[in-house]
Amino acid sequence: MLADRRDELARRRVQTVNRLQRLLSEFVPGQRKRDLSALQAKAILATVRPRVVAGKTRRRMAAEELADLVAVDAKLKTIKAELRAAVLARGSSLMEIPGVGPAGAARIRADVGTSPGSPTETGSPPGPGPPRWTPRPVSRSGLVCPGPGTGG
């Protein structure tokens, strides 16, 4: 659940940065940054002093987007700490793998769950699990032979 929320916030952050960059590029053309941080946007916005109504409105909209970016960044930081604590509480060593952070480890744990043969959350071993799949026999012509008990 936290991993999904983090993904949603990350998407929202990208959208906010894109809107903010679009607004800032109208004030300061040619200075578009690939990974714009809130501090960088604040510094750029501080240099802008529009005189016409359209420019003032654009600056106000950029300031609102900047406030949204700061809020989303704070939420992402909080969720990252929660994810780290949750992964460590489960005794997972996934974050020891280079390139796997709290969000990646939580996503892996959420998507994969417990593996067969490992203790479940209650500490008891899991049941036998789903039946194993066996391939159907293939005839010399390459056609799949009917399975046993199918009447064919």
Image: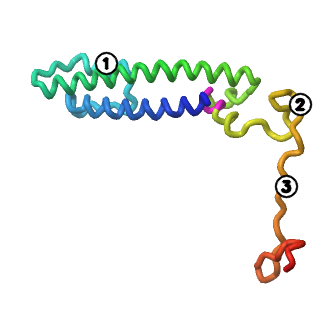
Query: What amino acid type is highlighted by mark number 3?
Result: Arg
Quadrant into which the N terminus falls = top right
Q: CA distance from mark 2 to mark 1?
A: 53 Å
For residue 57: magenta? no
Residue 125 image offset from top left, x and y in percent? 89, 34
Residue 98 image offset from top left, x and y in percent? 64, 31
Classify mark 2: residues with Cα within 10 Å, few (<14), some (14-19) or many (20+).
Answer: few
Which residue position holds label 3?
Answer: 132
Residue 99 visible in the displayed image:
no
52 on left or right of 64: left
Q: Nearer the viewer, residue 38 or 82?
A: 82
Residue 110 visible in the displayed image:
yes
Mark with earlier residue (1, 3): 1
Query: What amino acid type is highlighted by mark number 1?
Result: Lys
The disc label shown at residue 124, or none: 2
Which residue position holds label 1?
Answer: 42
Residue 17: image quadrant is top left
Give the magenta part as a residue range.
102-106
Classify mark 1: residues with Cα within 10 Å, few (<14), some (14-19) or many (20+).
Answer: some
Q: Nearer the viewer, residue 72 or 98?
A: 72
Residue 134: image quadrant is bottom right
Q: Secondary structure at mark 1?
A: helix
Mark with earlier residue (2, 1): 1
Q: CA distance from mark 2 to mark 3?
A: 22 Å
Residue 97 image offset from top left, x and y in percent? 68, 31
Q: How is the image coloured?
A: rainbow
Is 143 situated above or below 102?
A: below
Q: Main secondary structure of the magenta part?
A: helix
| Residue lying at 60% horizontally and 31% vertically, measured from the top left | 3
Classify mark 3: residues with Cα within 10 Å, few (<14), some (14-19) or many (20+).
Answer: few
| Residue lying at 28% horizontally and 34% vertically, measured from the top left | 22
